[in-house]
Image (cartoon, helix red, strand yellow):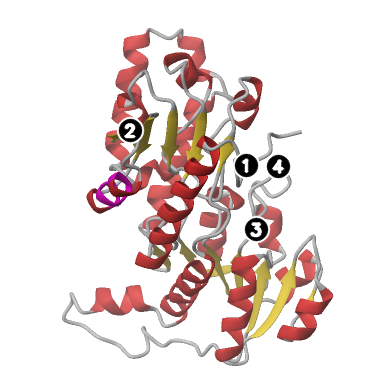
Amino acid sequence: MKQIVFIETEGAEQEWLTAELTEHKLHFAPDLATTPVDAQVVSVFLNSRIDAAFFQRHPRVELIATRSTTTEHIDLAECASRRIPVCNVPAYGDYTVAEHTFALILGLVRRLREALDSTKHATFSYEDLRASELRGKTLGIVGAGRIGEHVIRMSRVFGLNAIVHDIDENPQLARDLGFRYVTFDELLQKSDIISLHASLTPQTFHLFNRDTFAKCKPGVFIINTARGRLIDTNALCEALDSGIVAGAGLDVLEEERVLQRDTSRIIGDQIIERLHTQFPPREIRAPDNSRIKELQTLMLNHNLLERRNVLFTPHIAFNTVEAVERILIATVQNIRAFLTGAPINLVAPPN
């Protein structure tokens, strides 16, 4: 019998997991801070950061099973140094996220946020709410993996012309789906809509920045259901102000704590924390101080979400009944496989 701890789970999920893993002792914790010290298998989601400090408090951990594809919230190098395997869920929401991508695209081009806001006021203008058709427009897709491929397939239904930039080109896929690969610069110059489906790497961090936006076709729409840090928030705000970007549909942000609490509350908590730690005055003035940058990003995100031409959803592109079911099934399979000595879906540590 193992002590298995699940972080960030809902009531229905807990009932299902309990019924599936009856041979083990299960504990459901709201966050990492309340994880029992004797935890042996720990299953986390995106908001739980696994690092050296966590392992120091929980020395008996044998496996980290994340209920996600990404492992950005896990220090893989630290896990490797402690010989603690990490397994993930390789695929669960490919079609789901692709559908949500088009929900954001349609919401932007049909100006749904502005239309809904107009119902709260006495005045109404067809001119102010005039939208655009998708048919005949060019959709630039950055990253044609599993999700990107579904977006390409769906784009054909709307009469969109799809062009793709991907470091790993698949000529057969391009022939089958009727799109062409282009350079990144050509995609920026020709796309009416750009949808991001790339993974986050050192090379793609802030892929969209001041220089990138300056190369875009004026009036482009930006869609991001991938990773928040693919976009420099400050540069996006500037591009929206200048009109280079006509609108943004975002399911992810650079700093997603703004989704969980009001920005002012987060900043207030940070200030109080700093006061209690009695930090040196020079620390807060340091231009490269990570906490200051974090707070600046929070404020920028808050400013971004207030704009009428920004359609935002709180990281829910994956969140369907079917996708959550796939996550739970795969997680239980991962845990069982590890406990029987034949682990699956292991994530390799960084080189």
Number of residues whose C-alpha sits closer than 10 Å to that of mark 2, classed few (under 14), some (14–19) or many (20 or more):
some
- What's the magenta region? 13-18
Number of residues whose C-alpha sits closer than 10 Å to that of mark 1, classed few (under 14), some (14–19) or many (20 or more):
some
Q: Amino acid at mark 1?
A: Leu
| Disc 4 secondary structure class | loop
Q: Amino acid at mark 2?
A: Asp
Q: Quadrant of residue 163?
A: bottom right
At 83% from the left edge and 76% from the top edge, which residue is drawn? 171
Residue 31 disc label? 2
Q: Quadrant of the N terminus?
A: top left
275 sits to left or right of 175: left
- Main SS type for the magenta part? helix
Circles 2 and 1: CB atoms closer than 8 Å: no
Q: Amino acid at mark 4?
A: Pro
Of mark 3 and mark 2, the one earlier in the sequence is 2
How far apart are the two marked residues, 4 and 3, measured between alpha carbons? 12 Å
| Disc 3 secondary structure class | loop
